[in-house]
Structure formats: C-alpha cells, structure tokens
Image (tube, rainbow, N blue to C red):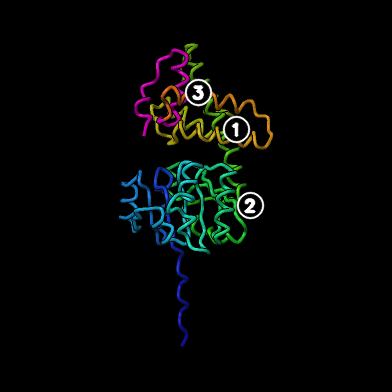
Amino acid sequence: MTHPTPPVPRERVGLIGAGLMGHGIGRNVVEKGWPLVAHDPYKPESVADLVQRGATAAATVADVGARSDVVILCVTGAPQVESVVFGEGGLLATMAPGSVVVDCSTNEPPMTRRVAAALAERGIDFSDAPLSRTPPEAEAGKLNVLVGAAPATFERIRPVIGAFAENIFHIGAVGEAITLKLINNYLTMGMLSVMAEAYAACVKTGIDPKKWHELTAPGVMNSGLFQMVVGGAVAGEADRMKFFVSNACKDITYFTHLAADAGLESPIAATVRASIERAVADGYGANFMTGLLDAQLARNGLPTVAWNDAAKA
C-alpha cells in the first residue's frame, strides 16, 4: 500500500510594513497559503485587515524576526530599513541563522549592501526586491518585482514573491536590483516633471489641457504614466497614481546619490530633483503625483485645479 507524500511545509513569512503596497503583498501571501505574521505600528487598520484574512499580528519587529523564516520589508526607505535591521530588537539580533530578509523597499545601494553583509555574518541571507507598479496591482497580486540575490536565495524566495508578483526579474547580485529600480524611477520622475510643466504651459497660454490630452492619447507619447497623471487630472481623478510626491522626492534624491557615487554626470536629474524638492517645500509632499501639476501651476501664479484637496491619502 502506498501512502501519499506529505506536503512540504511552507516557510513562515513575516511582513514589516503594511502600507499602500505592503498590504497587498501581505494579503496575497496569506490568502495563497503562507503563514504570515505582520507588523506596522503606523497602519494598525491594515494589519487588522490582514489578521481577518488569516495572518497574525506582531507587536514588535523582534516578534516578527523570531517567528519568521522569510521576512519581507516594505518600508519607506533607507533610514527605516536601517532601523528595522540594526535597531534595538531589530532583525539582525532576532532572526535565526538560515532565515532570509527580502527588502521590497526603495532603499539605497550602499545601505542594501551594508545590511546584506551584516546579516551574512550571522548566517542570514538577503535579497533586495524593489517593486514596480502601483497599489491596485499589489492588491491583485500583479506587481513587477526586481530581485538582487544569489541564485540559491533567489530560488528559495521566488515562490513567496510569486504570491504577489505577475513578473519577477532576477537582475543579478545583491544591490543590482535596487540600482536598476532607482534608474527606472528616475525616468518616471523625469517624465512626470516634464508633464507637469507642459500642463502648466497649456493653462498659461490658454490651451485647455483636455485638448492636449486628446492630442496625446492616440499618439506615440501616450503611456500608462500619462494616463494616470494627466488623464487623471483632466478627468478630475486625483488618485489614479497612488504615489506620494514626498516619495518621488526621496527616490530622485537616491538616484542623484547613485549618479554621484558612480561618477555619472546627470544634469537633468539635478533639475528634476530641484523641481520636486520645491513641490515638497511648497506643501505638496503629502499629495499623490497629480500634486506635481498643482505645484507647477501655483509657482506660475495659476489657480490650482479642483482635484487638489482630493489628491491626498
């Protein structure tokens, strides 16, 4: 008599950060069968929703580290990653040898490599796994994920990442995925900054922005990005691109650091950074990306549009 082979137990997954992107990650992980423990002191309602879906809440980072084989980080940036890993009760001190940290944050390459080296000394593997696409795709389990990891680590974490990703790209070694993410985000922020200036140029010269949208939509300059921000603006929908201007400022700053470290001349990036920094200084940091359009209108003495107040989370 033969007996069926028992299923291989799935690794215990921890999630630190349950915001706009992290909630969707956690939702797909737990609903697709992984044991999940989640922690986010700033988004208790998101953690509570994950608990209703089958996850367990953790009161501290240390609790996540002690109860997980794979910990996914989805926090804002380098300072938050540094705190979660190196702080008191952080992952460096609480995770067991043989476990792995998967950093889905938009970090900086030097911090990424520093974290990986410190964890490796304790026998803990690491992967940078920054995300592309937006919160709706996170909720649908259709993110694009770039991965920087040793081949064996990549194969280990790929099933977990597959729970929330439509496309997974193994870019190369640790640090290479976040490098490419910053380059890609620079392209995005540069295009959005030009769109904001063009939108303001329409208004300043008496052209209805809807006519610009009509012209561009069937042409070669149309894109998903154009439709999310400019298309959203002319339709009065401020939240098509749920990404904060403050995060755009962080990402373009990280890119300029990357360029400087590489000895790369990038004068356009410096201009884009200055423009977005001014938008934040003018009070638009908490807005979704339509806020770049409002910031450009305001600095040209033009009235901001009706969707401004709705453009904040």
* Pointer 1 local density, CA inside 10 Å: few below 14, some 14–19, many at least 20: many
Q: Using residue 152 as the reference point, say whether residue 143 is left or right of it.
A: left
Taking the magenta stretch, the answer to whether it contains residue 278 is no
Residue assigned mark 3: 196
Looking at the image, tell me whether mark 3 or mark 1 is earlier in sequence order. 3
Residue assigned mark 2: 173
Quadrant of image for the C terminus: top left
Q: Amino acid at mark 3?
A: Ala
Instruction: Tell how many labels.
Output: 3
Nearer the observer, 36 or 5: 36
Looking at the image, tell me whether mark 2 or mark 3 is earlier in sequence order. 2
Looking at the image, tell me whether mark 1 or mark 2 is earlier in sequence order. 2
Q: Amino acid at mark 1?
A: Thr
The region drawn magenta spans: 286-313
Mark 2–mark 3 Cα distance, whole angstroms, equals 36 Å
Give the SS element for disc 3: helix
Which percent across, then down, holds residue 153? 58, 59
Q: Which mark is residue 256?
A: 1
* Pointer 2 local density, CA inside 10 Å: few below 14, some 14–19, many at least 20: some
Q: Nearer the viewer, mark 2 or mark 3?
A: 2
Mark 3–mark 1 Cα distance, whole angstroms, equals 21 Å
Q: Residue furthest bottom?
A: 1
The residue drawn where x is 62% and y is 49% is: 171
Q: Amino acid at mark 2?
A: Ala
